[in-house]
Image (cartoon, helix red, strand yellow):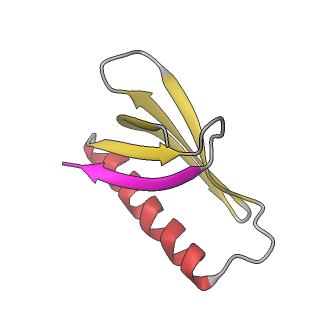
Amino acid sequence: MPQIIGKVECIQVGDDFGFVGLREEGTDDFEAFIIWFAPALPTAFLRLLHSMWLSMLREAFTTGDLVRIVHDTNSAFIRNVELRK
């Protein structure tokens, strides 16, 4: 699965969507990723997972720390988020 490491530049969250914008480390490339989008019936596990990702992304946004995002091939849906301190 592809991955990107960079700094969080923006986070947008609503009831049925969550997005994050990331500036790739060492380049001027900007990528937007989907945390979730209109899930029909999210499980408790999925809600908890997204909540943890948001906490890490918000911390990285505040502190300027790097994050590593793993996403689907040819898709912007996030599969994993890692805070890189």
Query: Within the magenta stretch, is there residue 79?
Result: yes
Magenta stretch, main secondary structure, is strand
Identified at 65% across, 81% down, the residue is 43
Q: Where is residue 73, by image quadrant? A: top right
Span colored in magenta: 78-85
Q: Residue furthest top?
A: 28
Rendered position, 78 above or below 53: above
Spot occupied by residue 80 in the image (x, y as percentages of width and height): 45, 56
Q: Is residue 31 above or below residue 45?
A: above
- Of residues 23 and 2, which is closer to you in this image? 2
Q: Is residue 36 left or right of residue 2?
A: right
Q: Residue furthest left?
A: 85
Q: Position of residue 35 (x, y in %)?
A: 59, 54
Q: Is residue 22 magenta?
A: no
Estimate the x, y position of residue 67 in percent, counting from the top left. Answer: 34, 44
Residue 76 lies, with reference to residue 49, above or below; the image says above
Total marks in image? 0
Residue at position x 55%, y 80% from top?
Answer: 45
Judge whether 75 appears above or below 41 on screen. Answer: above
Residue in the image at 29% along x and 52% along y: 83
Farthest right residue? 40
Query: Residue 3 at what x, y percent from top left?
Result: 43, 38
Pick whichever, 57 or 81, lies toward us. 81
Q: Residue at x 74, y 63 (%)?
A: 16
